[in-house]
């Protein structure tokens, strides 16, 4: 089987690393950004049995939705070039739910969508260790792709959906993780405020001069001074329903809130899509506003106290 991989960025490199594993699969890479892969799609697709699209879908000009027009053009071109014998097309690029709905409406039965949830710096590692396979499209086409990736990934769980459902899964998963990060940032704030050092830098004479209510408040804060966020979230994560992911504050990038390549883009696209329906995602919209504060204004440790002083 020969597969044409279109796009050799973060996702494309991960896909190629997987296709390298089985001896029964051959592949060719098409990406004009690389001299060695700058080849004619029109010519190479004629010799291929299937295609995987991994091109970028950046945020659109409006700053909210995704620009997936490049993927739409590629699907049209592939079907045009293989007009007498349409080949299976798997899309790994992130698509809007609206575009997936259009593909379904157009009757593009050879198109499947399998979303990815890769960390930018560990994309190949994440892809090769992925145990779930989520795919939307016609069942026979989807099962064919599941058979391909079962040869190169330790897949334990499979979910077969229609195209638009797979798109909802992609956005909903990243949206939920973003909400989770927001919750743990809020919890971190609470813990840090409870043990805030400003309550501890008070002399004995000052304590004696306080009324009973003020002394009780002070003693309450002194009780909290040893409170440790990491210990709290470790214990919290022992509940299997909660677990230990996405609770590091500040995050791996040393900042508060959620950032990176996928979460901000997908969350904005999801809320933008929902805002055009009768069911806007109000909780997620609030989390976006909170995250803007965490990413742009929130200070950590000494920086925070210095600014407050």
Image (cartoon, rainbow, N blue to C red):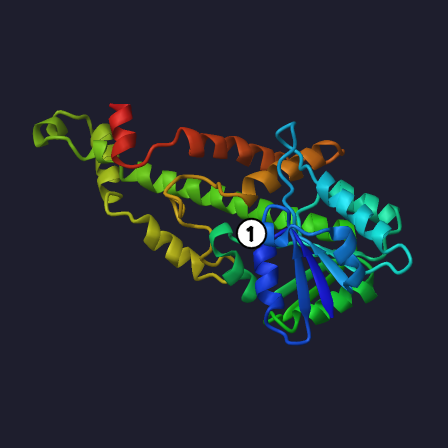
Above or below, 254 relative to 288: below
Measured as percent of width and height from the top left, residue 236 is found at 42, 56
Query: At 64% from the left edge and 47% from the top edge, which residue is drawn?
Result: 32
Q: Which residue is mark 1?
A: 10
Is 89 positioned to the left or the right of 206 in the image?
right
Q: Classify 168 as above or below 132.
A: above
Residue at screen point 48% across, 41% down: 258
Answer with the quarter of the image where residue 149 lies: bottom right
- Dot 1 lies on which element? helix
Query: Measured along the vertical axis of the image, is residue 263 above or below residue 208?
Result: below
Viewer-proximal residue among 298 and 54: 54
State the residue lying farthest toward the bottom. 23
In the orientation shown, which residue stands out farthest toward the left? 205
* Quarter of the figure with the C terminus: top left
* Residue drawn at 10 percent across, 30 percent down: 203
Q: Nearer the viewer, residue 253 or 235?
A: 253
Residue at 8 percent across and 28 percent down: it is 205
Left or right of 271? Residue 86 is right
* Residue, far right: 84
How many marks do you count on the picture?
1
* Residue 255 location, quadrant: top left
Q: Nearer the viewer, residue 115 or 213?
A: 115
Looking at the image, residue 18 sits to the left or right of residue 143; the answer is left
Q: Position of residue 148 (x, y in %)?
A: 70, 69
């Amino acid at each position: 089987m020969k597969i044409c991989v279109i796009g050799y960025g973060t996702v494309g490199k991960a896909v190629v690393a997987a296709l390298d594993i089985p001896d029964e699969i051959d592949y060719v890479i098409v990406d004009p950004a690389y001299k060695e892969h700058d080849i004619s799609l029109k010519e190479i697709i004629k010799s291929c049995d299937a295609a995987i699209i991994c091109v970028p879908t950046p945020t659109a000009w409006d700053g909210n939705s995704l620009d997936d027009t490049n993927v739409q053009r590629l699907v049209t071109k592939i079907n045009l070039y293989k007009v007498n014998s349409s080949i299976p097309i798997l899309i790994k690029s992130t698509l809007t739910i609206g575009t997936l709905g259009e593909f379904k409406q157009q009757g593009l039965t050879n198109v499947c969508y399998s979303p990815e949830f890769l960390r930018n710096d560990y994309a190949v590692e994440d892809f090769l260790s992925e145990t779930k396979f989520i795919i939307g499209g016609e069942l026979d086409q989807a099962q064919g792709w599941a058979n391909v990736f079962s040869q190169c990934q330790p897949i334990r769980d499979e979910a077969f959906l229609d195209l638009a459902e797979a798109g909802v899964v992609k956005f909903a998963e990243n949206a939920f993780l973003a909400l989770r990060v927001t919750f743990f940032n809020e919890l971190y704030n609470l813990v840090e405020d409870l043990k805030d050092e400003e309550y501890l830098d008070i002399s004995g004479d000052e304590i004696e001069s306080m009324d009973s209510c003020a002394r009780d408040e002070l003693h309450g804060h002194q009780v909290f001074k040893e409170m440790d966020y990491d210990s709290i979230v470790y214990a919290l994560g022992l509940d299997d329903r909660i677990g230990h992911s996405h609770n590091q504050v500040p995050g791996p990038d040393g900042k508060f809130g959620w950032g990176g390549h996928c979460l901000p883009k997908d969350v904005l696209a999801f809320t933008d899509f929902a805002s055009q329906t009768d069911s806007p995602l109000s909780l997620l919209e609030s989390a976006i506003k909170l995250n803007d504060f965490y990413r742009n204004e929130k200070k950590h440790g000494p920086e925070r106290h210095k600014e407050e002083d």
